[in-house]
Image (cartoon, rainbow, N blue to C red):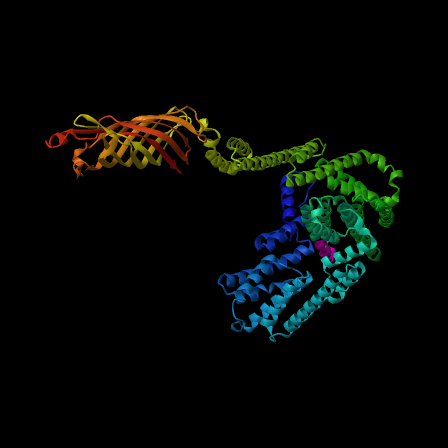
Amino acid sequence: MRIKRLLYLFFALTLAQSAQAQLFQNRNLYDVWITAEYKLNAGRFEEALKLYETAPEVPEFRKRLATARELHALFQQAERLYRSQKYAEALEIYSQYRAVDKALEVAVFERRIQACLQQIDKVLSKKLSESTRVVAGFEWAYKGERQLSVLDTAGALRSFTKARQLGASLNSTLREQYQEGLREVQAMRDWGAAYRQALETRDPERIAALLRTYRLVSKYIIGTLEYEIKSQEEILSGGNAQDPATRLQRYAAECSSENLLNYIRNNQAQLTRAHDMLEVLREYRQIEANIAGLKKDPENGAFLESAYNSLIHKGTQVPQVGTFLQLCAQKEYYHYLMQAARQLEKEGDESTQKDKYEAATRYLVNARQLNLPEYWLEIDEMQRRISDKLGCESSLQDFERAVVDVRQNLVNCRIQEGKRGWDEAWAKLSACAPNETGLWLRHRSLRDSLYYLARADSLFSVLSSQANRELQLKQCSEARQLYLRMSSLAVCDAPAREVLVADGLRAVAECEKSICYAVAKDQATAAAAAKEWQQAYDYYQQAHDCASPAQQEIIRQIMADLECDAYPSRCYKNVFFVRLEPTLRVSLNKPAYTENDVKETTGAGYHTAAGLQLSFITHKNPVDFVVGADFFRTQYQSLGTVQGTSYATNEFDISGLNVHAAIKLHRPNTAPERLRPYLKLGVESIFPLSYHRQDFISARSTNDRSLLKKQSLAALGAAGVEIQRKKFGFFAEVAGTYNFSGIYNTNAINGASTQSRSEAYFRTLGVRVGVRLW
């Protein structure tokens, strides 16, 4: 059942108008019924039973209460089997629900039946018991019937074929059912083929004629085909030339809700708010169907009154055609009331029971309150006739007693009850010339006060309903205007009005906040996608201000991630973070080299290094600190000269570990997302780990590591650019070092008298880069 929106409206109205004694003295029976049906379909049987128990005087409630109890017992029994995965046994119990009320379809049973059929379908039919095969066959046949009723011939063919495979000849009734179903499927498929051929001719008369023949083939009245028939007839008559809005209003004015529904469904692209119209119109048609069922029992009078009021109210909610459908519902209700009044008058004539005439009068009063002027003459005529049968003397006595009750109701702000009592009592006097007896003058002030407050209460109720509707549609400003208008109405129960209006305005504020949140969040998402971080952050701040507590928690997390990119100075104020990053250095090395205190010429060799650097990063302050370590290897040559030609005298290959510490100088308050230049100054310690010297003059070589110092110091300087975010970093710099303590171990050299004194001071210049993704 399509009742979600109706349920929402019901609960919203119930909550908002609990204090309005003059507007809603009793809970709407139809709303209670709809709520109970929702609970029943959801399998919440105990809640449904409690609701059905609220109106034992209504036959339909009594009947459904007994039905619900039986269904509850069946469901409990079947559910135990289902949960034990005994699907065949469970199906047999679930399917028994159809025998409880053949006109009733309960969603929770249907879901379980389909689930059982799916499980049984996995088992070979010969492994199933005969009873299970018959029950499953009937269920497939039932499904096929429903599919045929909506022109799903392919689905119906599968379902009836399943029924035949399972049932075979085990049950004669089932055999007749699936055989008849298969014949009708074939007949409809043949009809469909003929219809497609007719469509190819593009002859409206032939198409319309063939469409009508489906009624001879199918035992169902299929709404979509009926609409197609009407559409073809309109093509023939020229009615299809009207614009969509006019055709929409014409269908509504004809009170053909089914044609209206089909037209909207088939022309959604041409109609504004088509989805909303379809949703509300389906609910409207559901109420129409329920009313048709309720009319079968004349004792459902109070229930029908509630259902018709719901139908009228639902009609007003259909966009674009609400006025037409409201009038349709009012006219349908009017004819029901007049028919009931005539029946009661007839019963009164036959039995001379006065209460029959009084009941008929109440129906006439309700008919007049529908405010359909074209029927007032008919109402007046019948009212005078019944008044004459009641007799003026007793009617006058009833009127005087009613006046006392009316005054009491007025004092207690039961305005609608008081107005109903006045209208019924006055209607009984229709044939008694009440205006000539002085009654009108004596009670005019009471009547004027009553009608004034009744109009105010009626308008209050209408505005309240409209305001709730606008809130559902998120039209916050329109709802606010309606609540402000309600606050100025002079209703009887002013304190209750203030409570309802205050609750409504709070709901409007929540509505405005939800709209604000949705709009700001969408804008923030779009700005973030465009990498407009500051704009995105500001929009998220707006969304946070409009959000619920749960939403605020999520937004705060998003803003925390964005803050560093949006407002660096705010994010990094008085804080720093430490990051480790891999580095790579490629340089030229041209050492200052001496042999026996004689300066030797050296060539520019290579110097490579790779390692890790730990950076202490801040964007607020102008100074950062870095330390690092890397493995290096360098190779260079000493040169001699003969007649102006250089040649290599020695080749050196040294590798080891570099450890450096430095400070970086940059501008303060820098933005993390932007490149910033810097200068680096520091010291570097060199720890040689291997040494190789090849002497080309003497053709000797050495790998004696002891010839080198264990540690040597160098000055470090660099200029570069970097970007340093919390989760990403990159730098590139031109770096140079100068080794000022030398690399050779003087003591070791002096200890070998055959060796000469040597010294070398590394001088490097190159590029160092680093990157991190964390």
Q: Quadrant of residue 716?
A: top left
Looking at the image, is 113 positioned above or below residue 405? below
| 738 and 422: which is toward the camera | 738
Residue visible at 68% across and 42% down in the picture: 24
Give the percent coordinates (x, y) of residue 677: 41, 27
- Is 208 situated left or right of 86 in this image? right
Camera sees residue 650: yes
Name the magenta segment's main secondary structure.
Answer: helix
Q: Is residue 58 left or right of residue 718?
A: right
Q: Position of residue 690 (x, y in %)?
A: 21, 38
Q: Is residue 295 magenta?
A: yes
- Residue 769: quarter of image: top left
Residue at 83% from the left image edge and 35% from the top image edge:
442
Q: Position of residue 650 (x, y in %)?
A: 21, 35
Q: State the residue in front, 546 or 480.
A: 546
**For the magenta stretch, what is the residue range?**
288-299
- Magenta stretch encompasses residue 229: no
